Amino acid sequence: MAQALQNITISAPGFAGINTQDAPLQQEPSFAADATNCIIDKEGRVAARKGYSMVSSNGATVLGSSAGIESIGEFVQSDGTKIVFSCGNNLIFTGTSTLTDVTGSLTITANNWSMASLANKFYFYQIGHAPLVYDASTSALTTIAAHAGAAGTAPQGNVCLAAFGRIWVADVTGDKYTLTWSDQLDGVDFSGGSSGTLDLTTVWPGGFDEIVSLIAHNDFLIILGKRSILIYSGAGTPSTMTLSDTILNIGCVGRDCVQSTGQDILFLDYSGVRSLARTVQEKSAPIGDISKNVNNDIKTKVQAETGNIKTIYDPQNAFLLINFPDVGVVYCFDTRYPLENGSYRATTWTAMNPLCFTVTDADELYMGVATGIAKYATYTDNAASFDLQYFSHPLSFGDSSRLKFLKGVNITTFAGAGATVVLNWAYDY
């Protein structure tokens, strides 16, 4: 017997992002099975990500057949002058619209530089390489050893951090447990003043670990190993800083997989994306799992990735990006409103293929790509279109015991002129 048509409304489908952890048949319409080239906009809707437009015009010429720009950072000098440094093809460049090679006679064999700024100088560290410094007073890029003010030997570390008025360095070939710091406000002096070192071999809570990354937060120095985390207080005076907290069985997968949001520290562990939220009164460090809904996917990508995983937090767009360059996917976590389980709404990006990121002083998101420096802008990828794709999980529409036949669909979208929207549907049982 024929029955009257019933209207079923699904408002803001997928606004809770991807969920591939829970059983598909038990999920609400708010979760998506797939949300490719999407973001969660400020109204809480699934929306198209922006694309990228090229900033540099001569990248293909100076980068040749190399992977592209693999490291990028901005140096804001004391007089307000801004210089963007980028690295690729075993060269170091300055500039944005035109990449100018400033490598000179320096010997460089890789492009995975860690960069930091202190006291009107800009520093470059990479494992197996002599550390470099750009001095704004002389406009010269040299090794630290060749700098006129150098004292002692700067370690050839893989990670550097400018914090508490000095440069901190770690992760040296054959020594991944010693933390080294420079003199106060003098990042080229590693022997005088208050410079020093700290051996962490007896401090790791699990017996042994190796330093992967460093970050400062709320007057704490946070040292991330592969399997544990050390939190030091009083790092303004390193000789008397004390171990405030330790965390076992949680660490960091790579040097560039840690970001500060100003209120929290977000980092990529082998078990997923984590939040280090510190309770000031109790001096405790509870750990939040912000990728609960896609943890298995994240863990699979971490194991499969052979390149340098890079992350960035963009406060202007309120998202955390995690790039798996060889796998070919970027995970985007919306940081505006956590879900009830404490996780962040997750979507994925493809086709963009970035290699590195930086957020400039003007709040622009720059990224290194195969042909130079690009900017997160417009809604095309270097003038080429891309597809936004969203799939829901199977939907019972509130009553799984009743058969339903799709008779008609009305879709409300917010799109630019000329956009093509395609609806696919399928049924089971």
Image (spheres, rainbow, N blue to C red):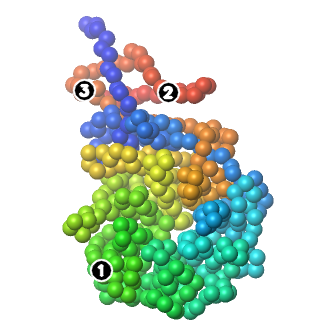
Position of 389 with respect to 367 (left or right) is left
Residue 378 appears at what percent x and percent y?
61, 40
Q: What element carries label 3?
A: loop
Tags 2 and 1 touching, CB below 8 Å:
no
**Sequence order check, earlier mark of 1 and 3:** 1
Circle 1 is placed at which residue position?
A: 243
Quadrant of the image containing the C terminus:
top left
Rate crowding at label 3 as few (under 14), some (14 to 19) or many (20 or more) other CA atoms within 10 Å. Answer: few
**Sequence order check, earlier mark of 3 and 2:** 3
**Sequence order check, earlier mark of 2 and 1:** 1
Residue at image point 34% right, 26% down: 10
Tags 1 and 3 touching, CB below 8 Å:
no
Residue 39 appears at what percent x and percent y?
47, 42
Circle 2 is placed at which residue position?
A: 414
Q: What element carries label 1?
A: strand
Circle 3 is placed at which residue position?
A: 398
Q: Is residue 428 above or below residue 280?
A: above
> Tag 3: residue type?
Gly
| Depth check, front residue: 27 or 171 | 171
Residue at image point 71% right, 70% down: 91
Position of 244 with respect to 67 (left or right) is left
Q: In which quarter of the image is residue 63?
A: bottom right
Is residue 354 in sight in this rendering? no
Rate crowding at label 2 as few (under 14), some (14 to 19) or many (20 or more) other CA atoms within 10 Å. Answer: few
As measured in the structure, the alpha-carbon distance from the residue carrying label 2 to the one carrying label 1 is 52 Å
| Depth check, front residue: 25 or 238 | 238
As measured in the structure, the alpha-carbon distance from the residue carrying label 1 to the one carrying label 3 is 53 Å
